[in-house]
């Protein structure tokens, strides 16, 4: 009797293990992305640099401030990027997570917000430089970075150094 219970318990353990592995979704190795950044940029509808303002849903949903637009339409100053299924609490192996305060080069799978992303896209951490790297300019079909209206307005404002620059050599100050 004990042997039969052990055999049933072992069978149940194996079946539950298969269900867990089988229901996990595609693994990173199943992604169709081959690591060719130029190809990914060429095929993308939208490419932008965004700084993560906040995250939710196990860090899979990000609200990003758009810093630079490399490809696609002018975007709002902030956009949503979904690195996984927002309506599901289950985390899949190909879900992308974001970290608040970090900046990403975003290459989503769709062309309008909320943007869809995963570990299978070319999205990556990025340090904004204010220009598109030469090797990517042809791929995105642009020679210059574009900005959201909010970022352009801030960039047009005189900096503190510009404002104070006139006072530096003023003997009356």
Image: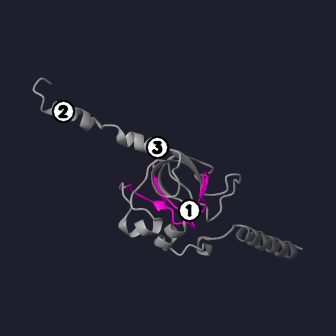
Residue 65, position as x, y percentages in the image? 49, 46
Residue 116, position as x, y percentages in the image? 61, 58
Any magenta on residue 110? yes
Most frequent secondary structure within the magenta stretch:
loop
**In contact (CB < 8 Å): disc 1 and disc 3:** no
Q: Which residue is mark 3?
A: 149
- Rounded to the nearest angstrom, the CA distance separating label 1 from label 2 is 45 Å
Residue 142, position as x, y percentages in the image? 43, 62
- Rounded to the nearest angstrom, the CA distance separating label 1 from label 3 is 20 Å
- Seen from the viewer's position, the closer of residues 144 and 68 is 144
User: Considering the image in quadrants, where does the C terminus appear?
Assistant: top left
Q: Is residue 78 above or below residue 70?
A: above
Any magenta on residue 48? no
Q: Secondary structure at mark 2?
A: helix
Residue 169 shows in the view? yes
For disc 3, the neighbor class at 10 Å (few under 14, some 14 to 19, many from 20) is some
Q: Tell me where the magenta segment starts and ends, as one range.
A: 102-128
Q: Is residue 83 left or right of residue 141?
A: right
Q: Residue at x 12, y 29 (%)?
A: 170
Q: Which residue is mark 1?
A: 45
For disc 1, the neighbor class at 10 Å (few under 14, some 14 to 19, many from 20) is some
User: Residue at the left extreme?
Assistant: 171
Q: Which residue is mark 2?
A: 166
- Rounded to the nearest angstrom, the CA distance separating label 3 from label 2 is 28 Å
Quadrant assignment, res 14: bottom right
User: Considering the image in quadrants, where does the N terminus appear?
Assistant: bottom right
Residue 62 shows in the view? no
Mark 1 vs mark 3: which is more N-terminal? Answer: 1
Q: Residue at x 39, y 56 (%)?
A: 127
Mark 3 vs mark 2: which is more N-terminal? Answer: 3
Q: Is residue 56 left or right of residue 159?
A: right
């Amino acid at each position: 009797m004990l042997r039969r219970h052990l055999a049933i318990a072992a069978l149940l353990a194996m079946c539950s293990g298969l269900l867990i592995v089988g229901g996990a979704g595609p693994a990173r190795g199943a992604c169709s992305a081959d690591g060719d950044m130029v190809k990914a940029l060429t095929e993308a509808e939208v490419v932008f640099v965004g700084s993560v303002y906040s995250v939710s849903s196990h860090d899979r949903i990000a609200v990003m401030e758009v810093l630079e637009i490399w490809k696609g339409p002018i975007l709002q100053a902030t956009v949503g990027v979904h690195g996984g299924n927002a309506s599901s609490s289950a985390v899949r192996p190909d879900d992308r997570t974001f970290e608040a305060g970090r900046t990403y080069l975003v290459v989503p799978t769709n062309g309008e917000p909320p943007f869809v992303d995963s570990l299978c896209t070319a999205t990556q951490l990025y340090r904004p430089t204010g220009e598109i790297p030469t090797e990517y300019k042809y791929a995105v079909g642009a020679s210059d970075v574009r900005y959201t209206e909010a970022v352009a307005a801030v960039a047009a404002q005189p900096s503190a150094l510009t404002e104070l620059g006139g006072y530096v050599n003023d003997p009356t100050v």
